[in-house]
Image (cartoon, rainbow, N blue to C red):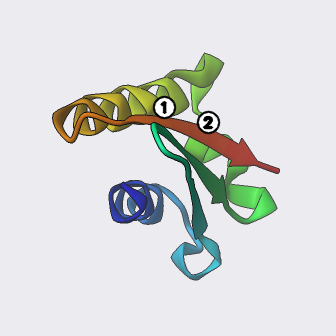
Amino acid sequence: MKELISYIAKALVDKPEDVVVTEIAGEQTSVIELKVAKDDLGKVIGKQGRTARAMRTILSAASTKIKKRSVLEIIE
């Protein structure tokens, strides 16, 4: 899941070298934290949060396939 979010985020931003993705794994749920450059934060969130919502939807679909739950948090 970490690689999936990293791939999507790097495709969206101007500074892909500043993308940092960390995964905090639990038994049933894993939290994926996405950190990007301050200038690129708007690109990752999108208008009215549409891009962030789309990334969460993709993550949810991929997580369902492996029978886990994943949550995406975008860190400022």
Q: Position of residue 2 (x, y in %)?
A: 42, 61
- Report the residue marked by disc 2: 45
Residue 13 percent location from the top left of the image: 53, 61
Residue assigned mark 1: 51
* Residue lying farthest to the front in this orientation: 27
The N terminus, quarter of image: bottom left
Residue type marked 1: Thr
Name which residue type carries label 2.
Answer: Ile
The disc placed on residue 20 is none
Q: Quadrant of residue 15?
A: bottom right
Q: Position of residue 66 (x, y in %)?
A: 21, 41
Give the residue furthest to the bottom: 17
Q: Quadrant of residue 36?
A: bottom right
Q: Residue at x 25, y 34 (%)?
A: 67
Q: Residue at x 62, y 70 (%)?
A: 20
Residue lying farthest to the left in this orientation: 65
Mark 2: secondary structure:
helix
- Kindly check if marks 1 and 2 are in contact, taking CB atoms under 8 A apart as contact: yes
Q: Residue at x 36, y 37 (%)?
A: 59
Q: Position of residue 33 (x, y in %)?
A: 64, 53
Q: Secondary structure at mark 1?
A: helix
Q: Sequence-wise, which precedes: disc 1 or disc 2?
A: 2
Gap between marks 1 and 2 measured at Cα: 5 Å
In-image side of 8 versus 47 (left or right): left
